Structure formats: C-alpha cells, structure tokens
Amino acid sequence: MEAHPSRLVTLSLFIWMASLQFSPMILTKASSCDFPAIFNFGDSNSDTGGLSAALGQAPSPNGETYFHHPAGRYSDGRLIIDFIAESLGVPYLSAYLDSVGSNFSHGANFATAGSTIRPQNTTQSQSGYSPISLNVQSVQYSDFKKRSQTVRSQGGIFETLMPKADYFSKALYTIDIGQNDLTAGYKLNLTTEQVKASVPDMLGQFSNAVKQIYAVGGRSFWIHNTGPVGCLPYSLDRFLITAAQIDKYGCASPFNEDSSSLL
Ligand SMILES: *[C@@H]1O[C@H](CO)[C@@H](O)[C@H](O)[C@H]1NC(C)=O
Ligand SMILES: *[C@@H]1O[C@H](CO)[C@@H](O)[C@H](O)[C@H]1NC(C)=O
Ligand SMILES: *[C@@H]1O[C@H](CO)[C@@H](O)[C@H](O)[C@H]1NC(C)=O
C-alpha cells in the first residue's frame, strides 16, 4: 500500500471530533509524508509482536509466506502497518512489550492481538480478549515517551535504540481498533441491537484515548475504520446466523450493520 498524501491526515483533535459527528469527514491534508517515527495502537490487525511477547508467541503457520517463520503477527505475512512503515522508510515497529531485541528509534507498537477499546469484564483465558485495551495502550505510550528519554540520555547504544525527543510531535500516530469490541458483545450473546447500543460508549472511550495521546504530544493521526466484522470467517463460524442474513457477498449482514455504526 502506498502512503498517498490524501490518505494521511494531520488534524487537530477538534477537527477529528467534528468529523466523528458530521459526515462527510472533515480532514486536513498533511503537508508532507515526512514522518520520522510511527506510534501504533490497536489489535491483531496491527500487532507486530505485543501479544506474542506478553502471552506466548504466535505459532506457525503465522509468518510462513513473508518472514518464513512466526514473526509476532497473526498473519501469514506483513500487516498494513508493515506496509505503512515501508512506505515511510522507517523500520518495522518493535512491540513496546517485547524486551528482546527491540529497537524503538523510529517508533513503537502498543497493539496486541485481541485488544478492545473498552476494557473487558472477562479474563484473556475466559474470552480470548487481550487485557491490553486501548486505555492501557495510551498509558503505556505516555510512560514510553517519558522513560525513553531518560534511557536515551545515557548516550552510546541507548541513543540508537530510543526515539529523539522531537520525533514524538513529528510522528504519525496510527490507530486500528474496535472490531473486537463488537465480537465481544456477540460472544456474550448480545443481540446486534444491544451491540449497536454500546457503540457510543466505544466511541467515547476511543476519543478519550486519542485526547490523551494528543495531550502528551501526538499531532498527526491515521485512524482506520473498523473492518466488516460480518465478513470475518470466524464470525460466520462462531455466531448464530440464519441463511436469510447472509448477503450477496457471503457476509453476515447484521454484524456488518454494527461495524458501519462504528465507522
Ligand atoms: C464491565 O462492567 C462495568 C460495570 O458493570 C460496566 O460499566 C462496563 O460497561 C462493562 N464493560 C463491558 C465491556 O461490557
Ligand atoms: C536501531 O535502529 C536504527 C534504525 O534502523 C539503527 O540506525 C540503529 O543502529 C539500531 N540500533 C541498534 C543498537 O541496533
Ligand atoms: C451463549 O449461547 C450459547 C448457545 O446457547 C451458550 O452455549 C453460551 O454459554 C452462551 N454464552 C453466554 C456468555 O451466555
């Protein structure tokens, strides 16, 4: 995927908030794509090793097509975040939680597979959802921002492992999360209407996290809409759906209705 300027957005929080409430989206174009670092927040769609570091490595066959071995991603190859890094000319992002071989000179990845916007009331072993919800990721980010500079000031190799202080305001902040908040509701046997009713709370907590990142220095944001949950093979497999609810693309239309209310 090419980083096309019109897809990159530099926006003040005010504009972003406005865009949530009014369609069409009002976004200002970035003047350039010269981002020296990326800080990413999200779930398995952009996890480059966080959950693997915290709770056990993603097993084979993950990584078989591109890395030729498991590489912390729940994918056979690269994720969109990897292509974004490539097109901005920065290295693949190390996971913040990975204490082995990480290099944060051009950013850090706070995403973990199974993350949700809202903290879940179930444990990872009960439900499969990560305890590293978006609010935790934003706390980790502000901790990283502070402590990375203390480490960097020791000089030598540490200077090459941590981002420069001015990278935090110049970086691209990418966020790709929300899909698991929807499926978490289905797993609790909530109706699609009940799930839809919790979307305002999801969006409220999402905007709080963005505000917190903005408050400690983030300025350029790339926010993915959530994908069509009703087209995920596991939604079709695990959740009750009737033949009449399958659309012409073979996807479960009630789940996609919830996805579009989170757009
Ligand atoms: C978890 O429980 C609290 C207290 O009942 C509730 O306010 C919150 O919405 C619940 N979270 C989710 C994700 O259901
Ligand atoms: C960390 O990555 C940067 C950018 O690729 C590189 O210049 C630096 O040498 C790396 N540091 C170490 C200790 O490998
Ligand atoms: C949801 O419904 C299924 C099928 O009836 C049942 O097995 C499961 O225990 C229910 N889950 C919850 C959290 O109530």
Image: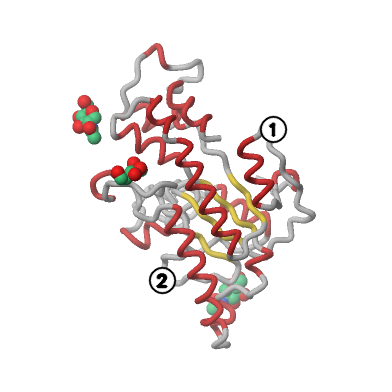
Which amino acid does the dot numbered 1 rest on?
A: Pro
Residue 114 seen in the figure: yes
Question: Which residue, as the protein is rendered here, is positioned at the far top?
Answer: 244
Instruction: Look at 41% across and 40% down and name the residue there.
Output: 181
Above or below residue 70? Residue 36 is: below
Ligand 2 location (quadrant)? bottom right
Side (left or right) of 263 relative to 13: left
Q: Is residue 248 above or below residue 213?
A: above
Q: Position of residue 261 (x, y in %)?
A: 52, 30
Residue 128 shows in this picture: no
Crowding at dot 1, Cα within 10 Å, few <14 / some 14-19 / many 20+, comes out as few
Seen from the viewer's position, the closer of residues 94 and 175 is 175
Q: Is residue 39 above or below residue 150?
A: above
Q: Amino acid at mark 2?
A: Ser
State the mark number for residue 95: none
Q: Which residue is mark 1?
A: 24
The quarter in which the C terminus is drawn is top right
Estimate the x, y position of residue 4 in percent, counting from the top left. 73, 46
Q: Position of residue 153 (x, y in %)?
A: 57, 85
Q: How is the image coloured?
A: secondary structure
- For the residue pair 56 and 23, the one nearer the viewer reads as 23
Pick whichever, 132 or 104, lies toward us. 132
Q: Which residue corresponds to mark 2?
A: 99
Q: Residues under labels 1 and 2: Cα distance?
A: 42 Å
**Residues at marks 1 and 2 touching, judged by CB atoms closer than 8 Å:** no
Does dot 2 land on a helix, a strand or a loop?
A: loop
Q: Secondary structure at mark 1?
A: loop
Circle nearer the N terminus (1, 2): 1
In the image, the residue with mark 2 has its CB under 8 Å from the nearest atom of ligand 2: no
